[in-house]
Amino acid sequence: MEKEQTEQAGTGDKIAYFIQKHRKALLALVIIIASGIAFSVTFFTIHGTLEKKAIAKVEVFERRMNEQGIPNGGTDSAEANALLGELNDFAPSTFGYAAARAYSLAADIYFSRSEWSRAEESWVNAARKAPKIYMAPVSLFNAAVAAEEQGKLDAAIGYFKESLDYSGVYPAAARARFNIGRIYDQRREYDKAREAYLELIEKSPESPWANLAHNRLIILENN
């Protein structure tokens, strides 16, 4: 028992000696850790405040669009032009959902005007600004549609394929796969078309798009 107490006392002395010897370094380490925690708290507080303000602002944009009937109508109005300018200024300066939504609103206006190139660019930007939320695959799908309208079929296939990275939570994945097959089909790249159709049938057998894929496969086999 006495031996244990002696060993414990010896260990305590060693720890005390170590702390005393390295007290400046240990104090500096404590200050660094405390500063890091304080910085993290401050950063996330400011980030959260900015995000709330940005989302509130984009909600105002969306409300203005709805009040003006944009993009369902009046897309060439002075209000639509002014709104587009504001959206294009705002979207690059913010982040996350707010930025993605702002780009998406601009894309809706461009799409309704058949300004396919600008619609494509805006939807791609929307996907890149918020790659981890549901808007990303939707934006990529829409970018593919805009690219196809321009005859940019390779780009369209690329966007459709990229949207499939989210297929686990993406309800339009079957439609994206069918569109990939359809474009290959139109280009007479029949082997790639078959591959896309078969993948669709395997991944989404109950989808109406799978039925269309079956029909296309039958036609391809008979040609």
Image (cartoon, rainbow, N blue to C red):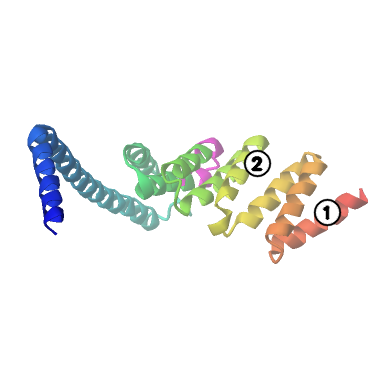
Dot placed on the residue nearer the N-terminal end, 2 or 1: 2
The label number, if any, that marks residue 118 in the structure image: none
Q: Secondary structure at mark 1?
A: helix
Q: Which residue is mark 1?
A: 217
Q: Is residue 174 left or right of residue 169?
A: right
Q: Is residue 114 magenta?
A: yes
Q: Is residue 76 visible?
A: no
Q: Is residue 121 left or right of residue 27?
A: right
- Report crowding for label 1: few under 14, some 14 to 19, many 20 or more residues within 10 A (C-alpha): some
Q: Residue furthest right?
A: 222
Residue 123 appears at what percent x and percent y? 49, 43
Q: Residue furthest bottom?
A: 206
Q: Residue furthest left?
A: 20
Q: Quadrant of residue 174?
A: bottom right
Residue placed most toward the observer, 76 or 178: 178
Q: Which residue is mark 2?
A: 157
Task: Decide: is 201 above or below 29.
Answer: below
Q: What kind of residue is marked 2?
A: Ile
Q: Residue at x 15, y 55 (%)?
A: 4
Residue 180 appears at what percent x and percent y? 69, 46
- Report crowding for label 2: few under 14, some 14 to 19, many 20 or more residues within 10 A (C-alpha): many
- Say if mark 2 contacts mark 1, CB within 8 Å: no
Q: Residue at x 82, y 58 (%)?
A: 215
On-image quarter of the N terminus: bottom left
Q: Is residue 63 left or right of residue 127?
A: left
Q: Is residue 187 magenta?
A: no
Please give the range of residues in magenta.
109-118
Disc tally is: 2
Q: What kind of residue is marked 1?
A: Leu
Q: Residue at x 79, y 48 (%)?
A: 194
Q: Is residue 96 left or right of residue 215?
A: left
Residue 179 appears at what percent x and percent y? 68, 49
